[in-house]
Amino acid sequence: MKLGMLLRNSGPASSAATISACARAADELGIDNLWTIDHIAIPPDDAEGSGGRYVDPLATLAFAAGVTTRVGLGVSVLVLPYRAALPTAKWVASIQELSGGRLTLGVGAGWMAAEFAATGVARAHRGRITDDTLKFFHECFANDVVTAHGQPFIFSPRPPRPPILIGGQGEHVMRRAVRHGDGWMPMSGDADKLREPIASLTAAMTDAGKPPPQVVPLLQLDLDSPERAAAQLVALSAVGVTGVNHTARYADEAEFRAMADALLEARQRAGLAASD
């Protein structure tokens, strides 16, 4: 069971000093993955808790890659319709290259109407844009020369493609995961609710000739009780969850370290390893 934590790229804790200190702490302590979040244009009436401050998730991961050597780096999730496909593919490949292959790419179609309005993208087209972008990503990572809008170009650097996890809920998300992804990022830590969709996704992946999916839910473990947190991890592992993304906020490095220590203790109590 891989342990992941939110690397805050929003609000007061998204300063360069706090981001670098927390990334180094995760690297040192043995946390498996750090995850950023994606908002590009928060309206004033939705800014509580962040003040509207969001550092770009990919820029944050590139910054974190430069101050760490081991910890995995991911975004949960990058809203693909907000961004042009080619520059985004270049960002993803560059982070994967410079981090030594530590990137995991969580992606989604988005939901916030205000952000679609600000980016000038039709919200009704978000599913099609997401699928088209994912198809293009696969072409880029599979070929030295790629064609976009009729123009051939060299896609370099071209490191191994990072794992792609599809965020969201519903049958369309599962179809997208089978067609374009390597796994799923649900927004639920309820093992009972995850059991059936994980089993269905695993069967569909097998039918498509693909390995079992990585499943990394966004959740908050009950770290006030190491025993309850350990029980949560055991239950999640039993239904096919391969990692967790603990999304609780923190104010500073000290709070981040305390949270990381509690997560590692919960995994130890659960008798799980990162590979479980």
Image (cartoon, grey):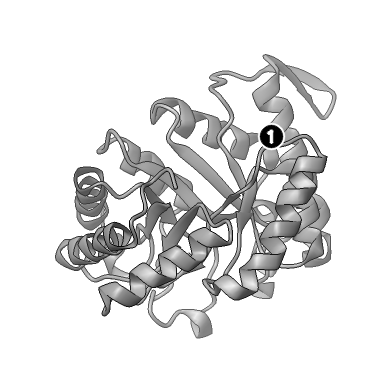
Q: In this view, does 80 lie above or below 144?
A: below
The image position of residue 49, as x and y in percent, is 38, 79
Q: For residue 196, what is the image quadrant? A: bottom right
Q: In the image, is 23 to the left or to the right of 36?
A: left
Q: Nearer the viewer, residue 84 or 30?
A: 30
Mark 1: which secondary structure?
Answer: helix
Q: What is the number of callouts on the image?
A: 1
Q: In the image, is 16 to the left or to the right of 94?
A: left
- Residue found 39% across the figure and 74% down from its top: 50
Q: Nearer the viewer, residue 35 or 124?
A: 35
- Residue found 37% across the figure and 53% down from its top: 272
Is residue 38 at all visible to an observer of this figure? Answer: no
Q: Is residue 66 above or below residue 33?
A: above
Is residue 219 at all visible to an observer of this figure? Answer: yes
The image position of residue 261, as x and y in percent, is 21, 61
Q: Which of 170 and 212 is in front in this view?
A: 212
- Using a 10 Å C-alpha cutoff, classify the residue at mark 1 as few (fewer than 14 neighbours), some (14 to 19) or many (20 or more): many
**Residue annotated with mark 1:** 137
Q: Is residue 198 above or below residue 212?
A: below
| Type of amino acid under label 1 | Phe
- Residue found 24% across the figure and 66% down from its top: 262
Q: In the image, is 28 to the left or to the right of 174?
A: left
The image position of residue 264, as x and y in percent, is 26, 58
Q: Which of 246 and 136 is in front in this view?
A: 246
- Residue found 44% across the figure and 48% down from its top: 276
Q: For residue 109, what is the image quadrant? A: bottom right
The image position of residue 51, as x and y in percent, is 38, 76
